[in-house]
Each structure stands twice: as structure tokens, then as C-alpha cells.
Amino acid sequence: MKKIFLTLVVMLMSLNAIDSMAQSIFSNKEYDGGHQAREAYLQGAVPEVDGKVVFTKSIDAAGMNKADIYLRLTNWASLRYNPSTERGKWNDVNYFKNSEYARILKASAEDGTLKIQGNEDMVFTNKTLAKDMAVVSYILNVVMTDGKADVTIDNISYTYNLTENAERIEADDWITDKEAFTKSGKFNKGSGKFRVKTVDLVTELFAEIEEALK
């Protein structure tokens, strides 16, 4: 009887170990970033429009007219997307906000529009001699009217394996609910980390714009 009990204990310990290994695909110590609760990345966190990944948010700017909003957001954009901005300005040294390809594509005070090409490092893990990262590219559009700014982030893609064999991956084919999860509801090891970091990036961009309009 004692042997049977010990056998059951060993089996339970083995099952727990297997489950822990599965959960490590989404480890707080790795690429979930630790910026938000786990629920922030689960089903429904990545919105789609006609099969394309499109993040949108209407940001309140009570008491400001279109000209005021335009002035503040163009100032924010010039600081964030100017490649010459010192990287030390940002809190996370492994998450660079600027690259030579990041730039303001269009800025119209009359129309109240701002279009930006984002291009920045996306670091998943950074260990000694083992840095796992990609470069994320996206388009950020802002339409400004009196009292608010409507923000859209789309055309998201990643350049992975930064070598002569680099891969270009479209977010539309990679981080959606359909692609990012296994049939059992766990994150796919390949695309899950991209989804997590993308949700963090979008959340950060919305927060920066909100702060600029306070």
C-alpha cells in the first residue's frame, strides 16, 4: 500500500512539472514584460478589422481645441520619433523608441492629422550571449478635433532573426486570437511573445498620448 501511495505521489509531481513547463511559455520572468496583468494579453486583446490587426482609441482632451492638441502631439512625436533623441531618455534600455527608419510621415495643422512611421526594437529576452529580439514597424495615425484625438495603430510587422536570413512577419498573420493560441488555450511559443510585446507597445503609446494631452 505504501509503495502504491509513493507511486501516486511521484506521478502527481511529474504532472505538476509538465504543467509548469507548459506555463513557462508565458513566464513573468521572460517575455510577458511584466507591464500588465496576464489577462491583458488573452483572447480579445488584439482587435481585428476585416482580418487586419487594428488598435484604436479615442483620447479625451477636454478644454483643448484642435490647434492646441496638434501643437502638443507634434511636440510629443518629434521627441519620440526623432532618431537623434538620446536613448538614455527612456526607462527601459532594452526597448529603444527610435531608429533610423522612424519618422513623421505627415503633419497637417489644418486637417488636424498626424501620420507616423514607427520602427523600434522589441526585446523579448536579454541574457548574456542570448538576446532574443525583433524590430517592429507600424503606422500610427491621429485625427484631431476639438476636445479629442482619435488614434489608430495598424500595418504592424516584425523583422525577426536579424541576420542575412531575417524573417518579415505580419501581425495580421501572427498575433491574432487564431494564431497566438493553441487549441488548449495556451500561448503558442512562437507568436505569443510577439502578441505580448505588441499589446504592451500599443498600451504604452496610448498612455504617452494621453499624458501629452493632460
Image (cartoon, rainbow, N blue to C red):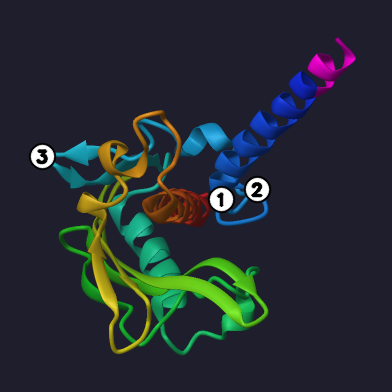
**At label 3, which amino acid type do we have?**
Asp
Q: Position of residue 28 (x, y in %)?
A: 65, 48
Do residues under tags 1 and 2 come within 8 Å of each other at their CB atoms?
Answer: yes
Q: Check if residue 154 falls in the magenta segment.
A: no
Residue 56 appearing in the image: yes
- Cα separation, mark 1 vs mark 2, equals 6 Å
**At label 2, which amino acid type do we have?**
Asn
Judged by depth in the image, the label closer to the viewer, 1 or 3, is: 1
**At label 1, which amino acid type do we have?**
Asp
Question: In the picture provided, is 82 more to the left or to the right than 166?
Answer: right
- Cα separation, mark 1 vs mark 3, equals 27 Å
Of residue 193 and residue 64, the one placed in the foreground of this image is 193
Badge 3 marks a residue whose secondary structure is loop
**Which residues are the magenta region?**
1-6
**Any mark on residue 50, and which?**
3
Judged by depth in the image, the label closer to the viewer, 3 or 2, is: 2
Q: Position of residue 199 (x, y in %)?
A: 43, 48
Residue 147 appearing in the image: no
Up-down relation of residue 62 to residue 104 (above or below): above
Whichever of labels 3 and 2 marks the residue nearer the N terminus, that label is 2
Of residue 58 and residue 171, the one placed in the foreground of this image is 171
Q: Quadrant of residue 163?
A: bottom left
Q: Residue furthest right?
A: 2
Question: In the picture provided, is 211 more to the left or to the right than 109?
Answer: right
Q: Position of residue 188 (x, y in %)?
A: 40, 45
Residue depicted at 51% across the width and 71% down the height: 132
**Any mark on residue 32, and which?**
1
Up-down relation of residue 13 to residue 34 (above or below): above
- Cα separation, mark 3 vs mark 2, equals 32 Å
Of residue 104 and residue 33, the one placed in the foreground of this image is 33
Q: Which residue is mark 2?
A: 28
Q: Indicate the quadrant containing the N terminus: top left, top right, bottom left or bottom right.
A: top right
